[in-house]
Image (spheres, rainbow, N blue to C red):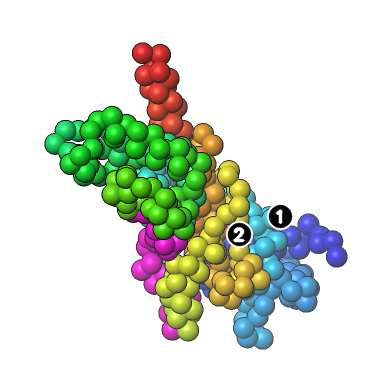
Amino acid sequence: MKMSDRKKKILQIVVDEYINTAVPVSSKSITEKHLTDISSATVRNELASLEELGYLTQFHTSGGRVPSPQAYRFYIEELMQKGNLSDKDLDYIEQAFKDKSRDVEHLIKNVTAVISELTDYTSVAVTPHADAETIRSLSLLPCGDGIALLVIMTSERILRDSFIDMPEDMGEDDLEKASKMISELFAGKALSEVRETEEQILADFGQYREVMSEVIEALKSYTRPREEDVVLSGAEKIFNHPEYEDIGNVKNFLTVIASKDKLADIIEGENDEIQINVKIGSSGDKDVPDDCSVVTATYSAGGKNLGTYGVIGPIRMDYPKVITVLENVGKALEELVGGRIKDKKDDDNEQKRR
């Protein structure tokens, strides 16, 4: 059924009012605040019709209406008007990313704190899983006194790892041969494959087995459980919202955030671009409680996946504010990281020219 413009307007008013007040919306408040040229009886009829269509619910016969998950979905897709962030919020984002001395990984993980502070909801991020990085090359650089520095170049970064002890009888020529063999052996493999092939590699490596064992241990240190890729900020902010005065809602919420594997399944995106994804209750995802919504965005810069970030909170979420924050934080993050990637490429090219 095609919805009339008047029904759309009334539904938009109900959703906006309920998001702002958490109080069921009555026909009287609509006519007094918003539609002064329409009678209360006409608005009541429209509200009743919207309820029949599944967009509104009513806790009490004489009370006002509240939006259903179906209403929020229609609101987001058809009615929502995104606003602009205040100068204060924009300044906060700028200041949060101003310290360019921090490494990219540290910066990305702190995005959750920024999003949580600006939205007043719990923020979650799933950062790119290191296991998926592909090894491009390995080098063992002699440092004197029987010690070599392991340098690992992956598809994403250069890792200057811990120092490795060299056998007493290993000279620099032998170290160079071992370095070349190790690089050829691992080039093109994902970090996740190191554990799977460890036993076979050590069995086949002969005289350089001792060195290879230390290299493998260094590589294994970069593989980690998936739950370590999940970052959570502002869990306590749920208590700022009236829905969580209900102990049942609190238990549902805590059940979700207690399992980082479950959070990763809920949050992770499939696209390497800023793309807003909204899951409203269990209709949006079976792992999301009926009384919760999750809004996420996946960010990238210079072809580098920066992770998926978002908020989890009540269905009565301030979707316009949340989506605007995610978009603005994403642009700031991508501009900063994109600039760093460009600077790094310029430095690499300059070194090659030299």
Across and down, in percent, residue 269 comes to 57, 54
Asked if residue 256 is positioned above or below residue 145 in the image, the reply reads below
Asked if residue 240 is positioned above or below residue 8 in the image, the reply reads below
Q: Nearer the viewer, mark 1 or mark 2?
A: 2
The residue under label 2 is: 278
Across and down, in percent, residue 25 comes to 61, 72
Instruction: Tell me, yes or no, whether the highlighted magenta stretch contains residue 237.
Output: yes
Q: Reading the chain from its start, which is encountered first: label 1 or label 2?
A: 1
Residue 346 quadrant: top left
Across and down, in percent, residue 220 comes to 37, 54
Question: In front here: 75 or 23?
Answer: 75
The residue under label 1 is: 78
> Spatial distance from mark 1 to mark 2, Cα to Cα?
14 Å
Question: In front here: 206 or 318?
Answer: 206
Q: Residue at x 64, y 62 (%)?
A: 13
Q: Quadrant of the N terminus?
A: bottom right
Q: Residue at x 30, y 39 (%)?
A: 150
Residue 133 can be seen, yes or no: yes
